[in-house]
């Protein structure tokens, strides 16, 4: 009987590199958005509201930001305190509210987005748009595989 653990293969190495890349991207984003006194999560939240004149519920924000609703509450509180977003009553449901951008939030986002879009292009370096699209498609497939794998795991 062989008790040795098999050596990890190239797929394992690719997962490690993906994690390293995600961490590097997150850390770079923290530095990038600090000039506007925003965290990457705060930027992501206001960016989600950019084209949503009717706003989003906190549950919708939670789903789109892929974070727990309680963490979204903290983000909303901080951004509302800065006057960048506001809670607005939801039509038809007095218990619910929608989160919307304020004029100040829209103005700030208008300053950030051109710089952000240029930086996003620069980060890709010599990757072609076709390569970037193929990578995005591959990563979406990988995310689906992860979801399928995770659904099969026993719960605690």
Image (cartoon, helix red, strand yellow):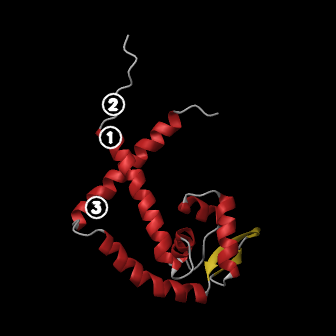
Residue 23: which quarter of the image? Answer: bottom left
Q: CA distance from mark 1 to mark 3?
A: 20 Å
Between label 2 and label 3, give the one nearer the viewer: 2
**Is residue 115 positioned above or below 40 on the image?**
below
Q: CA distance from mark 2 to mark 1?
A: 11 Å
Residue 121: x and y in percent read 31, 74
Residue 72: which quarter of the image? Answer: bottom right
Whether residue 86 is visible: no
The numbered dot on residue 11 is 1
Whether residue 73 is visible: yes
Which circle's residue, 1 or 3, is located before the other in the chain?
1
Question: Do residues under tags 2 and 1 come within 8 Å of each other at their CB atoms?
Answer: no
Q: Residue drawn 72% across and 71% down?
A: 92
The numbered dot on residue 133 is 3
Residue holding disc 2: 7
Residue 116: which quarter of the image? Answer: bottom left
Quadrant assignment for the N terminus: top left
Q: Secondary structure at mark 2?
A: loop
**Is residue 73 positioned above or below 156 on the image?**
below
């Amino acid at each position: 009987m062989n008790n040795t653990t098999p050596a990890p293969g190239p797929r394992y190495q690719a997962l490690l590199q993906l994690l390293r890349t995600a961490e590097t991207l997150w850390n770079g984003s923290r530095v990038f958005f600090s000039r506007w006194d925003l965290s990457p999560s705060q930027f992501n939240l206001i960016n989600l509201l950019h084209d949503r004149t009717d706003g989003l519920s906190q549950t919708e924000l939670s789903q789109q930001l892929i974070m727990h609703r309680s963490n979204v509450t903290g983000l909303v509180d901080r951004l509302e305190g800065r006057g960048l977003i506001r809670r607005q009553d939801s039509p038809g449901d007095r218990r619910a509210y929608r989160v919307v951008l304020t004029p100040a939030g829209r103005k700030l986002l208008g300053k950030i987005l051109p710089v952000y879009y240029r930086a996003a292009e620069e980060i890709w370096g010599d990757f072609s748009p076709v390569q970037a699209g193929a990578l995005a498609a591959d990563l979406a497939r990988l995310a689906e595989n992860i979801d399928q794998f995770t659904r099969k795991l026993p719960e605690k």
